Amino acid sequence: MNITKHIALFTLLLMVFSCQTETKEEKQTASYAEELHSFARPNTSAIKHLNLDIDVDFETEIISGIATYTIENNNATEIILDTKFLVIDNVEADGKTTTFKLGEFDELLGQPLTIDIKNSTKTITVTYKTTEKTEALQWLTPQQTADKAHPFLFTQGQAILTRTWIPIQDSPQIRITYDATVKVPKELMAVMSAENPKTKSANGEYSFKMKQPISPYLIALAVGDIEYKAVSNRTGVYAEKSMVDKAQFEFSDMEKMVVAAENLYGDYDWDQFDVIVLPPSFPFGGMENPRLTFATPTVIAGDKSLTSLIAHELAHSWSGNLVTNATWNDFWLNEGFTVYFEIRIMEAVYGKDRANMIALIGRQDLDDEIENLKKEPNRTKLKLNLKGKNPDDGMNSIAYDKGYLFLRTLEETVGREKFDVFLKNYFKTHAFSTITTEKFLNYLNANLLEPNNITFNTEEWIFQPGIPSNQAIIASDKFANAEKTLNHFLKSDTIDASLTIDWTTLEWVHFIRNFPKTMTAKDVSRFDEAFNLSNATNSHIAMVWFEQAINLDYHGNNVDQNIEDFLIRVGRRWYVETLFKAFEKNGKTEEALAIYKKSRANYHSVTANTIDKLLGL
């Protein structure tokens, strides 16, 4: 071979190698979208597996231990983890002590933990402990639990709080598997978002495995004097002893829900679906931690009337846990899909009437949210811009109910049969991955709209404020009857309680929400006397009644004390924020502050931070 051929071959090989290198670099660069809420740079080095070994100390209220990570190292000399309010004692790379530094503290994001590694490093190990400022953890005294006998601990990682109890790359784009060893007092049980024990260990040590890759915000831990009761061979409940039978009854349709969900959109990929009922300070209705949904006791109504929450968290096993929003700007991809799926599950299990009532309640919530945000219309877009803001700011009815309305409108436009095929393929195609809004829209166009020659104003729905005019119209005969009954009662001298005897919680909520603003104190009193609403044991009915009592300046039937007791006992942010907003809106700030002084200590940081901001503290 002559020199010319040598040069030509060398040039060709160089070009091929260059193209391969560029392709590989482009692929790496495209692996992770720009992340506003994490210091991590996963395109250069990303965690893939966590082995966690921790001690839970209730006396000091500290978790301490060791987090060891297997990493994907793209020729990097450092790896960055997110931390907030953690003490870092030591760091190792491949088993040898290495240098590290904590960066400047940011009030929202915490501190970057930059660890020096070699381009061949495969594992890093961080020895650390939490502090009293750790926001994900809520340590509860025995008095704050149902049984009043032992303390309790639970975590809440969403959106960016996992970094406050584990040093981690705290972005939803990061998907990891994990193992954990957790040591707790021997009279307590530990459970996680993983394979879980069904009985207490003899020595208080528990081992966990999560073999499916999940985002860090879904790593969850609860520790308490709890028991387990099965509902089926793959569903069951954990709760304190006084609550476990009630929870088992309330959630006895869980297996039916799983079957309905699988019939709609494919196999349940997480093996087990259990629910733990937490103490009432839990800040959300539920949290979809894989294999173990965390739930508020406020859904234990005794008649299964609030179990749409369980359907919602189950639906997250597909939309959120299986296919996850890549960034918090894309949060609607988690929640809009989940509300849609929840309502389809409820329709399959309980019928169209109940499903439509749930959808219409959400539609009313959406109208309220848009009214609340009329001075900030950009916050009513589905695709958000949360730069410099807490992701919690995007966790409102826009993501949930506008997202649902968009999908329902799509369904009605293309037809349910085609839409179901599309969604089933969407979940299967993107299983165990994360997705941006833009990537979803490309998939939507290529797999639903273009093949069916359908024109749809997708850009307006996603990127513009407000609700487009081509929205699906949601109606409910049962709600129409509730409104008719309300008007009848207002015009009558007497109230015939038999007209409401078969009402569900949803009908009561709609009935109370539709009280006219001009309603007289006499009428409010008449309704309370007829139905004893100020002493309602159903938490959702109580919440909307208390809101109306504040709005209409009603003080009968011990309602003021009951509102205070409710706000001290219940930490569910939606309920708490609704009532404090009512105080604020009606110029009753002093009353609100007086109650909040007593209640704040019972709230998780998620709820407390929201109310602090609301009341200007």
Image: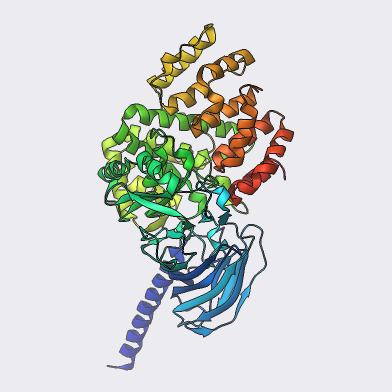
Regarding residue 262, the answer to whether it shows in the image is yes
Q: In x, y percent, where is residue 344? A: 33, 37
Q: In the visual, does 296 lie left or right of 14?
A: right
In the picture as drawn, the residue positioned furthest to the right comes out as 590
Q: In the visual, does 141 lie left or right of 246?
A: right
Of residues 428 and 316, the one drawn nearer to the viewer in this rendering: 316
What residue sits 39% from the left and 70% below the top?
A: 23
Of residues 236 and 179, the one drawn nearer to the viewer in this rendering: 236
Position above or below: 209 against 240? below
Position above or below: 115 against 185? below
Regarding residue 452, the answer to whether it shows in the image is no
For the C terminus, give its image quadrant.
top right
In the picture as drawn, the residue positioned furthest to the front comes out as 149
Q: In the visual, does 41 lie left or right of 429?
A: right
Position above or below: 513 against 338? above
Q: On the image, which quarter does residue 243 sit in?
A: top left
Of residues 59 and 292, the one drawn nearer to the viewer in this rendering: 59
Q: In x, y percent, where is residue 514? A: 53, 21
What residue sits 45% from the left and 66% below the top?
A: 204
Number of marks: 0
Q: In x, y percent, where is residue 569? A: 58, 41
